[in-house]
């Protein structure tokens, strides 16, 4: 489940507006309403923003990676509420942080959105950033985030209207930010950006800057513990008896160590009907056949991962309430033990929470899997691949191509040797986040040269 997102992808490579649709886990009703009601209203959102992929390489703008640069604590930036799917929200948040840093201003903690709705204000369910991610931790690791209570004089607010439309180029956007970094604008205590949500702003930063901010986003304990519970259920799947989930008590009574946990493969399966409609359109527009994968193709490719030791547990991250299709549990190769939330007995954990939190829990489960397999045109999958690439880099790998590395990720929508899924590591040297935000079929496993490290 990409507890994903539904939004209008503005013009991309010159095509007509199309929706990048995600489906949100467990939210059948929302999905139906989105299709029936919301999508038409979204056409107004974009048409802007992503016309221009010819990015100037603003390397000079990258953040210093060492410590020792200071952000002013008495000047603030306020941004519009952050909306859409979890990963769109993470990207939007990071972009807001990077904009604030460029203005040398503290970012006023923005609201995230617990639900997918965003045109219906009363359904938007704003949720404070610090209800989801640890505020202090973020500031310790990354810095630059402030609270409204830090404000001295709320009357000194200057509004900055983000431009839009075809003529609002990357360069104009950058000029605007630079202008607002100078007097007289800079004298205002607060600059409030109005207009489009930050996901749709132009991008001026390299992938590495975003990656650093994603690393500073740590879930609050309550949700981190829920993710631990799900993972411990997965780790408790017994070797024999493919359907059994061993409880903690079972493990203790059986002496614990008799069975090492099986490796688990998390598969972010995008096969919901909305996604299929969307991805077919995208395939046509991009003249490729490497975006949509059927259930059968996903099972086959996951079954062909070179060097994967079986038996292995397969955790299916799917919008199962939406899909309502137990057939995803059938047809796996021998040695693959497929589980979705219900079979694992964790649907109760998820159903307590709004979609944003469900998505955040599933994100953790995928992030920490021994092997992750996703779709390279999904933002959810792409951010997981990025964070896993970061982990591997921190473990000292310069090439992600080997077969015995920890934390490998794969894209099932692109075939590799023996009809397995393509090894996937984010290109950390990329000069913009475009490939991560909007998907790509140019993926590879050696993203990093040692000179970058
Ligand atoms: C921000 O402003 C402070 C005070 O003027 C300055 O010391 C600091 O170097 C600036 N930081 C950046 C990143 O420009
Ligand atoms: C707040 O700003 C306004 C306008 O600049 C000014 O007139 C007022 O005295 C300020 N109030 C405080 C408490 O600083
Ligand atoms: C689409 O791709 C195919 C095969 O890669 C190529 O032969 C064809 O010319 C392409 N069509 C367009 C319109 O680019
Ligand atoms: C899903 O299937 C189950 C039984 O297979 C049925 O009871 C339930 O109503 C279905 N849910 C939806 C949302 O279609
Ligand atoms: C990664 O991105 C950089 C900068 O855009 C590019 O020069 C390089 O070829 C890319 N590497 C791979 C493996 O695609």
Image (cartoon, rainbow, N blue to C red):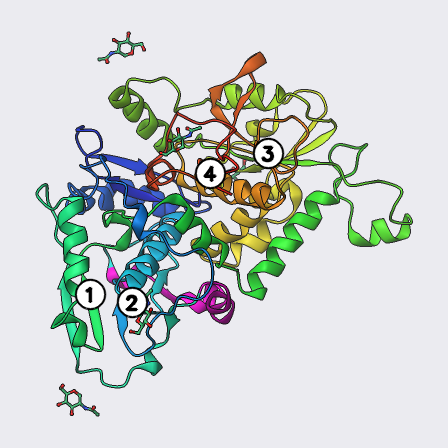
State if disc 1 and disc 2 touch (CB < 8 Å): yes
Q: CA distance from mark 4 to mark 3?
A: 13 Å
Q: Does label 2 or label 3 sit earlier along the sequence?
A: 2
Q: CA distance from mark 2 to mark 4?
A: 32 Å
- Of residues 237 and 101, the one nearer the viewer is 101
| Residue 102, percent from left and from top | 28, 60
Mark 2 or 4: in front is 2
Tell me if the residue at label 2 has its CB under 8 Å from ligand 1.
yes
| Residue 64, percent from left and from top | 40, 56
29 left or right of 19 in image: right
- Looking at the rendering, the stretch of residues picked out in magenta corresponds to 121-142
Mark 4 or 3: in front is 3
Residue holding disc 2: 104
Circle 3 — which element?
loop
Circle 2 — which element?
loop
Quadrant of the image where one finds ligand 3: top left
Q: Does label 1 or label 3 sit earlier along the sequence?
A: 1
Mark 1 or 4: in front is 1
- Of residues 212 and 312, the one nearer the viewer is 212
Classed neighbour count for the residue bearing mark 1: other residues with Cα under 10 Å, few (<14), some (14–19), many (≥20): some
Circle 1 — which element?
loop
State if disc 3 and disc 1 touch (CB < 8 Å): no
Classed neighbour count for the residue bearing mark 2: other residues with Cα under 10 Å, few (<14), some (14–19), many (≥20): many
- Of residues 70 and 334, the one nearer the viewer is 70
48 left or right of 261 in image: left
Classed neighbour count for the residue bearing mark 4: other residues with Cα under 10 Å, few (<14), some (14–19), many (≥20): many
Residue holding disc 4: 381
Circle 4 — which element?
helix
């Amino acid at each position: 489940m990409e507890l994903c997102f539904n939004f209008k992808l503005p013009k991309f490579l010159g095509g007509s507006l199309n929706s990048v649709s995600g489906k949100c886990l467990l939210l059948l009703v929302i999905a139906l309403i989105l299709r029936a009601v919301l999508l038409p209203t979204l056409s107004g959102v974009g048409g802007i923003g992503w016309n221009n992929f010819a990015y100037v390489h603003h390397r000079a703008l990258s953040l210093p990676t060492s410590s020792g640069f200071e952000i002013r604590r008495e000047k603030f930036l306020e941004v519009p509420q952050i909306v859409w799917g979890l990963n769109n929200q993470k990207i939007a948040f990071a972009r807001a942080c990077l904009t604030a840093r460029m203005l040398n201003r503290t970012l006023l903690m923005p609201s995230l959105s617990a639900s997918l709705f965003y045109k219906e204000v009363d359904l938007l369910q704003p949720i404070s950033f610090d209800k989801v991610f640890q505020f202090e931790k973020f500031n310790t690791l990354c810095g630059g985030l402030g609270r409204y209570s830090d404000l001295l004089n709320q009357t000194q607010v200057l509004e900055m209207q983000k431009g839009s439309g075809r003529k609002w180029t990357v360069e104009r956007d950058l000029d605007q930010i630079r202008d607002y970094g100078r007097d007289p604008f800079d004298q205002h205590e607060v600059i409030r950006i109005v207009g489009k949500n930050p996901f749709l702003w132009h991008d001026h930063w390299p992938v590495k800057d975003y990656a650093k901010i994603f690393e500073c986003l740590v879930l609050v304990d309550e949700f981190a513990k829920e993710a631990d519970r799900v993972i411990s259920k997965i780790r408790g799947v017994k070797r024999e008896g493919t359907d059994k989930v061993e409880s903690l008590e079972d493990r203790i009574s059986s002496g614990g160590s008799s069975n090492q946990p099986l490796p688990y493969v998390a598969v972010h399966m995008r096969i919901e009907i909305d996604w299929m409609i969307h991805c077919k359109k995208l395939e046509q527009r991009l003249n490729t056949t490497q975006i949509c994968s059927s259930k059968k193709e996903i099972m086959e490719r996951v079954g062909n991962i070179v060097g994967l030791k079986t038996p292995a547990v397969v955790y299916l991250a799917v919008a199962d309430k939406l899909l309502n299709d137990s057939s995803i549990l059938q047809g796996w190769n021998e040695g693959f033990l497929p589980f979705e939330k219900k079979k694992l007995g964790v649907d109760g954990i998820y159903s307590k929470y709004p979609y944003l939190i469900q998505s955040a829990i599933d994100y953790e489960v995928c992030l920490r899997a021994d092997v992750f397999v996703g779709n390279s045109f999904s933002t959810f999958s792409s951010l997981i691949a990025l964070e896993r690439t970061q982990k591997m880099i921190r473990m000292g790998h310069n090439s992600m191509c080997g077969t015995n590395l920890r934390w490998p990720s794969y894209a099932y929508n692109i075939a590799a040797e023996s009809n397995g899924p393509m090894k996937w590591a984010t290109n950390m040297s990329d000069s913009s986040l475009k490939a991560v935000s909007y998907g790509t079929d140019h993926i590879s496993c050696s993203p990093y040269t040692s000179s970058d490290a």
